[in-house]
Image (cartoon, rainbow, N blue to C red):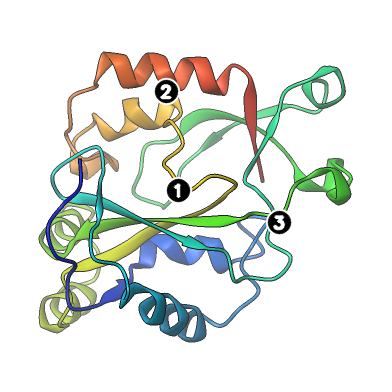
Amino acid sequence: MESNNPPKKLILDQFSYRAFDSTKTKNFIKMDKTEFLNKVNEQYKSITQLVDGYAPFCKHIFIKNFVKDLKSEYIEINEETEKLIKTKYNARQKNELPVLIRYIPMDLIDKNKIPDAKFLDLILYSKEQIVTESIAMKMEESHIENLKKTDFDYGIISIKPINIDKELPFTPITMMRNALGVSEGGSGIEIDKKKYMDGVEFWSKNVMIQ
């Protein structure tokens, strides 16, 4: 389950920028991206192993949350929260196919009822995969060339504030999207039925907060 030695350093991939953008999520990281990355890389020095993700190019690291006022990204579904659930078609970036998601707007919940995030799940993609997907998504040539020249092994593609130091099950729709080709925003990875059902079990009882 664990991988080999960690890479030289991490970078923030453009895909993770949404975590710092108040127009994308109310539960955003109130820190400068460079400051955040410096703190992550400082903790990263003591990490000796990466946790395997859903594909060979995907890894995780779990670190203690150091971001102030950052809440957990999900909450349990109960009588009070169920009536607040909304749905929408969502694309994480402009070249992706939109998919239907469900969530609760953070403005609808008393923030005191949302637990503070104890950990950050940093999802990493290898440099090779990030370059491959950037080309497939027809990103600017200057961005692609800069990626190729930058000295890194993994980029942070997602930052998940959570309360446990292990990966949450993917939402079923995320697994479906990952099964798409890279030109549609996926990774071309076949759905793992057990993990899919684990996701159904968890996300039938919990809902994302945005």
The answer to which of marks 2 and 1 sits earlier in the sequence is 1
Q: Which residue type carries mark 3? A: Lys
Q: Examine the rendered structure and indicate whether residue 153 appears above or below residue 24.
A: below
Label placed on residue 153: none
Q: Disc 1 designates what residue?
A: 92
Q: Quadrant of the N terminus?
A: top left
Q: Identify the residue at image location x=65%, y=48%.
A: 72
Q: Disc 3 designates what residue?
A: 26
- For label 2, the crowd category at 10 Å Cα-Cα, with few meaning under 14, some 14 to 19 and many 20 or more, is many
Q: Is residue 80 left or right of residue 90?
A: right
Q: Identify the residue at image location x=74%, y=47%.
A: 115
Q: Is residue 121 left or right of residue 77?
A: left
Disc 1, SS: loop
Distance from label 2 to label 3 (Cα)? 23 Å
Q: Disc 2 designates what residue?
A: 172
Q: Is residue 109 or residue 183 the one in the foreground?
A: 109
Residue 48 screen position, x and y as percent: 24, 66
Residue 193, image quadrant: top left
Residue 176, image quadrant: top left
Residue 111 screen position, x and y as percent: 84, 50
- For label 3, the crowd category at 10 Å Cα-Cα, with few meaning under 14, some 14 to 19 and many 20 or more, is some
Distance from label 2 to label 1 (Cα)? 16 Å
